[in-house]
Image (tube, grey):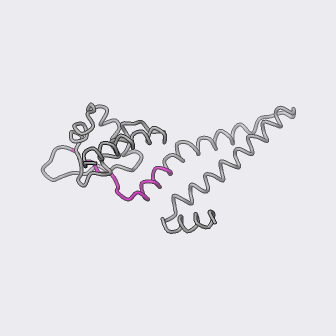
Amino acid sequence: MEFNEAKNKFIQNWGILGSSWGINRTMAQIHALLLISPNVLSTEDIMDELKISRGNANMNIRALMDWGIVTKEYKVGERRDFFNADKDIWAVARLIIKERSKREIEPVLKVLSEVKKAEGNTEEIETFKTVVSDLESFTSSLNGVVEKFVKSDEHWFYKNLLKMVK
């Protein structure tokens, strides 16, 4: 397979994976392009490569920067902004998981904490409280695992993963 074909296939498939992870396809494709690029890219470079509009590029670059997986860089004498993605996949995974936890797990925990305070003593209310408490306990445990992963280094994670598999 020639390089351009492999590159395009990687970018397209990263976009599909991104959709599965809860981000839009274009955002994931921009991340893939920056991830495999040896040099920083301008918005125009990204637009040309992916055949997307300036607005689409700007909106998704901003979102990637909000997630912390893309950074803006400046070149002396250049008026354009340039962008770079962290090439350390372990660091990228930790940032993505941390951001998803903040956007998904923490709001769920907040809602569960609020709704478990439903008042009353009927069987329906007691069942509701039991299920909500169990969900809260499970989600808190999951959040603890996520926090340990985010704070861990690669070697600690693999060592403990191998212990669980055996």
Q: Which residue is situated farthest in the front direction here?
A: 1
Nearer-the-camera pick, 31 or 107: 31
Magenta run includes residue 83: yes
Asked whether the viewer can see residue 46, the reply is: yes
Determine whether, in the image, residue 43 is placed left or right of residue 23: left
Instruction: Depth check: give the residue in front, 60 or 20.
Output: 20
Residue at 64 percent of width and 44 percent of height: 109
Whether residue 106 appears in magenta in the rendering, the answer is: no
At a point 45% along the width and 54% down the height, the residue shown is 93
Give the percent coordinates (x, y) of residue 42. 22, 44
The stretch of residues the image draws in magenta is 81-98
- Residue 83 location (% of width, % of height): 27, 48
Left or right position of 157 against 122: left
Relative vertical location of residue 73 with respect to residue 110 in this rendering, above or below: below
Quadrant in which residue 63 is drawn: top left
Q: Quadrant of residue 61?
A: top left
List the single residue furthest toward the right.
Answer: 122
In the picture, measured across the screen, residue 145 lies left or right of residue 21, that is right
In front of the other: 19 or 121: 19
8 horizontally vs 126: left or right = left
Which of 1/56 is in front? 1
At which x and y percent is residue 155?
50, 68
Q: Is residue 63 visible?
A: no
Q: Residue at x 44, y 59 (%)?
A: 90
